[in-house]
């Protein structure tokens, strides 16, 4: 009886991992420009958004973000381009392969253009801070291209 229970648990676990790794994603849900009207941060239960004033032309900042994102482990561009002015990246967790989506754009703010980066988890009710960590790491690597948060 115990063997049957353990086997059942194993099957459910494998099915869950397969679902997370293989289920199709409707990119239209995630490839939407994040909105911001001023510089600052906004943390949700499974997301993190940062908006920063930029100190260089928008295309240069977006190219720099693209370079930083492509150097991030297990991250790939899944929609958009620098030329489009809107990019969405998928980053998968190392162990289970949970996908997170990070969308980047530049919007007009009252004090000039704002770089807006929104990272969010696809599954679960908490991202355990990984989206905030990723977004802040990308911003740190941009250095003088963005004005630090006050």
Image (spheres, rainbow, N blue to C red):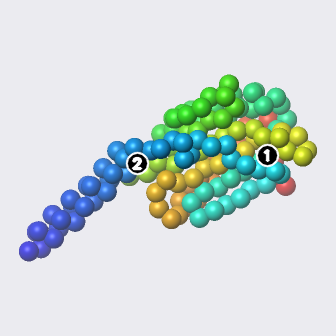
Residue occupying the point 62% across, 28% down = 81
Q: Which mark is residue 135?
A: none
Farthest right residue in view: 111
Mark 2 packing: few (<14 Cα in 10 Å), some, or many (20+)?
some
Residues at circles 2 and 1 in contact by the CB criterion of under 8 Å: no
Q: Is residue 136 visible?
A: no
Q: Secondary structure at mark 2?
A: loop
Q: Disc 2 and disc 1: Cα gap in Å?
A: 30 Å
Q: Disc 2 designates what residue?
A: 97
Question: In the picture, which quadrant includes the C terminus?
Answer: bottom right
Residue 75 can be seen, yes or no: yes
Pinpoint residue 99: horizontal percent, then vertical percent: 47, 48
* Left or right: where 24 falls relative to 115: left
Q: Quadrant of the N terminus?
A: bottom left
Residue 55 in the image, given as x and y percentages of width and height: 85, 35
Depth check, front residue: 140 or 85: 85
At a point 57% along the width and 60% down the height, the residue shown is 46
Q: What secondary structure is found at the residue carrying circle 1? A: strand
Residue that extends furthest to the bottom in the rendered view of this protein: 1
**Which of the two residues, 109 or 149, is positioned nearer the viewer here?**
109
User: Mark 1 — residue?
Assistant: 52
Residue under the image location 90 percent in, 46 percent down: 110
Percent of width and height locating residue 45? 59, 64
């Amino acid at each position: 009886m115990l063997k049957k229970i353990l086997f059942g648990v194993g099957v459910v676990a494998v099915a869950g991992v397969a679902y997370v790794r293989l289920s199709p994603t409707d990119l239209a849900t995630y490839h939407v420009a994040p909105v911001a009207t001023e510089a600052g941060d906004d943390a949700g239960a499974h997301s993190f958004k940062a908006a920063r004033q930029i100190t260089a032309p928008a295309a240069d900042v977006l190219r720099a973000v693209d370079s930083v994102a492509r150097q991030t482990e297990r991250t790939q561009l899944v929609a958009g381009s620098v030329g489009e002015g809107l990019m969405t990246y998928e980053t998968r967790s190392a162990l289970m392969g949970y996908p997170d989506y990070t969308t980047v754009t530049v919007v007009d703010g009252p004090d000039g253009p704002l770089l807006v980066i929104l990272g969010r988890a696809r599954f679960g009710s908490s991202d355990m801070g990984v989206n905030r960590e990723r977004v802040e790491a990308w911003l740190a690597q941009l250095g003088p291209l963005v004005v630090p948060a006050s």
